[in-house]
Image (cartoon, helix red, strand yellow):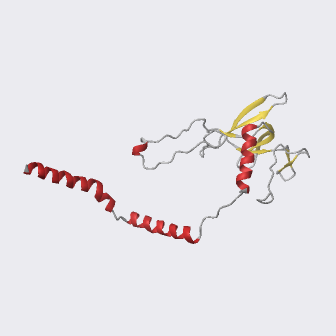
Amino acid sequence: MKKQASRFVVLFGCFIALFLLPGCDQSQESKDRQIVDKQQAHYAKTQPIPFYDYSIPRDILIQIYNVITQESRNTYTVIETVMGQTKFHGPSLGYGIPADVSVTNPLQPAFPRRLSNGEVIEQAEPNGVFSSKNTDGTWVLFIDDNGDITPVYTEHKVTTFPFAVKKDETGGWIRADKKKSSLTIKIKSNKGN
């Protein structure tokens, strides 16, 4: 009976050591985190984050997403080197697509959810693709003289305009004509409109 009691005491002691004592860790990192949390709580009371009824940047981004995701608009795209040397330019359809976007999430959790340490897995953009932050490659849909749409892959810098452009005498790009832009944004003048 004494053996069982002593085993129980040893097991109970191991349980305490394994599961309760790590919570008592007062490392410098833990102390720093507590100070930062306290400071952030103070800021939240004295300088709360403002709440807005309307956001112009959000409205603009939604309008752009609606057009580039759901409509085929004529554009004009210029492909240049980082030094500004023009490699190609011409009529195009829509806006460039980064070469390494994905229709499925390329990031997956390394461990099952119950074992993860709060890892963050990116979500798809509103246009249904997973954006990348790692590429210079871009697919551009150029429009041939006969109307065919031809995908062109480039690793040069891509600028797409919602109107035709041409080079001016300084080497910069200017509007080539007075035709209406293929993409315009409506800005609300105030939140009451």
Q: Which is more toward the observer, 26 or 77?
A: 26
Residue 39's spot in the image, x, y percent?
50, 69
Residue that sits furthest to the bottom in the current view: 46
Q: Residue at x 52, y 41 (%)?
A: 107
Q: Which is more toward the observer, 164 or 79?
A: 164
Residue 64 appears left or right of 4: right
| Number of numbered tags placed on the structure image | 0
Residue 56's spot in the image, x, y percent?
74, 56
Residue 11's spot in the image, x, y percent?
19, 51
Q: Residue at x 25, y 56 (%)?
A: 17
Q: Quadrant of residue 77?
A: top right
Q: Quadrant of residue 190?
A: bottom right
Q: Is residue 50 above or below residue 111?
A: below
Residue 106 appears left or right of 189: left
Residue 84 appears left or right of 9: right
Residue 157's spot in the image, x, y percent?
71, 45
Quarter containing the C terminus: bottom right
Q: Residue at x 57, y 35 (%)?
A: 104
Q: Which is more toward the observer, 177 or 55?
A: 55
Q: Look at the image and tell me whether residue 95 can be seen.
A: no
Q: Residue at x 44, y 64 (%)?
A: 33
Q: Look at the image and tell me whether residue 45 can be seen.
A: yes
Q: Which is more toward the observer, 51 or 59?
A: 51
Residue 51 appears left or right of 91: left
